Amino acid sequence: MVESVVATPRPPLRPLVASYTGYRVEGADPGVHRGLPSRHLTFIVTLGGTVDLVGLPDPGQPPSSFATLVGGLHSTPALISHDGYQHGIQLALTPLGARALLGLPAGELAATVVDLDTLLGAVAGELVERVRTATTWTDRFLQLDGVLARLAHDRGQPDPELAWAWRRLADSRGAVGIGGLAAEVGWSRRHLGERFRREYGLTPKAAARVMRFETAHRMLRAPEAPGLAELAVRCGYYDQAHLTREWRELAGCSPTTWLAEELPSVQDAELSLPQH
């Protein structure tokens, strides 16, 4: 059984959280799920079991199990071992949401996974209790709305140039050239790269790769997905070989391997929403 329910937060929270996804998987074959790179930070509260990470984007971080977690932006997959059962809620945090809800720029969490208690203290316990006490997805999402609305504060924003550069990359789905992006911002390419990475945890080039990969991932999961050669052209890759190389680096496997082995995932539901 696979259950996935997607909702958007109340309007004031939408610049901070792109989506809530409730998921429940039972009776699947045990295996390893790939947590794919995304433009969003990952925020998970489990409703049963733990998230067992056996491979993390930062190779220096040892395997760990989490009942709650926040994961920063990354450009390689996180590997999650499961016994065929997964149950929880995943939030897709925007970089602005990292500042407003967690009190730090997304760059400070780059490629790492942290327990929610470490970031939110006692508020994490309250959030988890309210979500786990609720008995329906609708009520769980309402509980999240309530806690996050109270938690959200203006704790500073990225410099306007960095916020603009992020939006420009997102709007182009990673297609804009980095040299041209730096020229549009009015900074040198090196200065943009250093400042962008400090704020977001990825260089502009890496962020563009992730956003282009997201587009390919979303199209590949569509009911009438194009063939890989057409997919490569439509997503801005040089050719199918380039698409496959990028997929291997970002997902850890080829597109065809991923399709064959992957469970219906939280990110599939997330990618069905408008991208910001």
Image (cartoon, grey):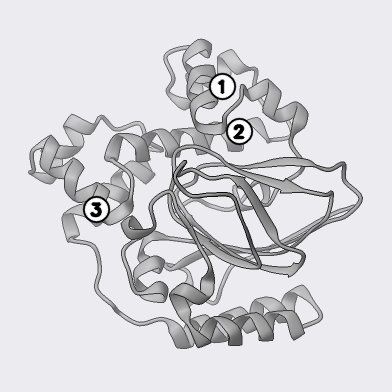
Q: Which class describes the residues within 10 Å of circle 2: few (<14), some (14-19), or many (20+)?
A: some
Q: CA distance from mark 3 to mark 2?
A: 31 Å
User: Which secondary structure lies at badge 3?
Assistant: helix
Q: Give the image quarter of residue 152.
A: bottom left
Q: Is residue 8 above or below residue 192?
A: below
Between residue 46 and residue 158, name the one nearer to us. Answer: 46
Q: Is residue 12 visible?
A: no
Q: Secondary structure at mark 2?
A: helix
- Foreground mark, 3 or 1, reads 3
Residue type at numbered disc 1: Leu
Specify the quadrant of the image occupied by residue 223: top right
Mark 1 touches mark 2? (CB < 8 Å): yes
Find disc 3 in the rendering and name its residue: 198
Say which residue label 2 marks. 219
Q: Neighbour class for label 3 at 10 Å: few (<14), some, many (≥20)? A: some
- The picture places residue 56, in percent across and down from the top left corner, at 53, 45
Which residue is drawn at the image coordinates 32% and 53% (left, top)? 200
Residue count near mark 1 (Cα–Cα under 10 Å), binned few <14, some 14–19, many ≥20:
many
Task: Please identify, in this view, whether the residue under mark 3 or under mark 2 is nearer the observer.
Answer: 3
Question: Is residue 217 depicted above or below 272 in this figure?
Answer: above
In the image, is residue 166 above or below residue 248?
A: below
The answer to which of marks 3 and 2 sits earlier in the sequence is 3
Q: Are marks 3 and 1 in contact (CB under 8 Å)?
A: no
Kind of residue sitting beneath label 2? Met
Residue 36 in view: yes
Q: Is residue 140 above or below residue 242?
A: below
Q: Which residue is mark 1?
A: 231
User: Amino acid type of disc 3?
Assistant: Arg
Tell me which residue sits at (59%, 84%) in the image.
125
